[in-house]
Image (spheres, rainbow, N blue to C red):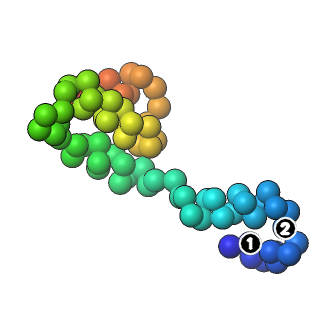
């Protein structure tokens, strides 16, 4: 992961950053957008809980702004 540098040449913070990004990668935008579009309200789930779940998925969709969120929710 550190190539072409050797791990021994890296600082602790650089190694920590490399490992963190490797072990906890950012979600793919296209996958998150698909999750957002396919998310259905679960049985027994309140509308507020459903809306909160959609907003949480939206964070990783790569869209920006409240207007875009409202547009996606409407659609």
As drawn, the residue found furthest toward the right would be 9
Report the residue at 54% width, 58% height from top. Answer: 24
Image position of 28 (left or right of 12): left
Mark 2 or mark 1: whose residue is earlier in sequence: 1
Q: Residues within 10 Å of mark 1 (few under 14, many from 20)?
A: few
* x then y, percent, for residue 8: 86, 75
Residue 60: which quarter of the image?
Answer: top left
Image position of 38 (left or right of 27): left
* x then y, percent, for residue 1: 68, 73
Report the residue at 44% width, 37% height from top. Answer: 59
Residue 44: which quarter of the image?
Answer: top left
Q: CB of mark 2 within 8 Å of CB of mark 1?
A: yes
Does 65 sit above or below residue 8? Answer: above
Q: Relative to the observer, which residue lies in front, 61 or 24? A: 24
Which residue is identified by label 1? 2
Which of discs 2 and 1 lies nearer the camera? The answer is 2
Report the residue at 41% width, 43% height from top. Answer: 61
As drawn, the residue found furthest toward the left would be 43
């Amino acid at each position: 992961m550190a190539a072409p540098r050797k791990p021994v040449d890296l600082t602790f913070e650089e190694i920590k950053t490399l490992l963190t990004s490797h072990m906890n990668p950012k979600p793919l935008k296209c996958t998150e957008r698909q999750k957002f579009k396919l998310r259905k309200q679960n049985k027994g789930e309140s509308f507020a809980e459903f809306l909160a779940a959609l907003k949480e998925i939206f964070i990783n969709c790569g869209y920006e702004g409240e207007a875009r969120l409202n547009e996606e929710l409407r659609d």
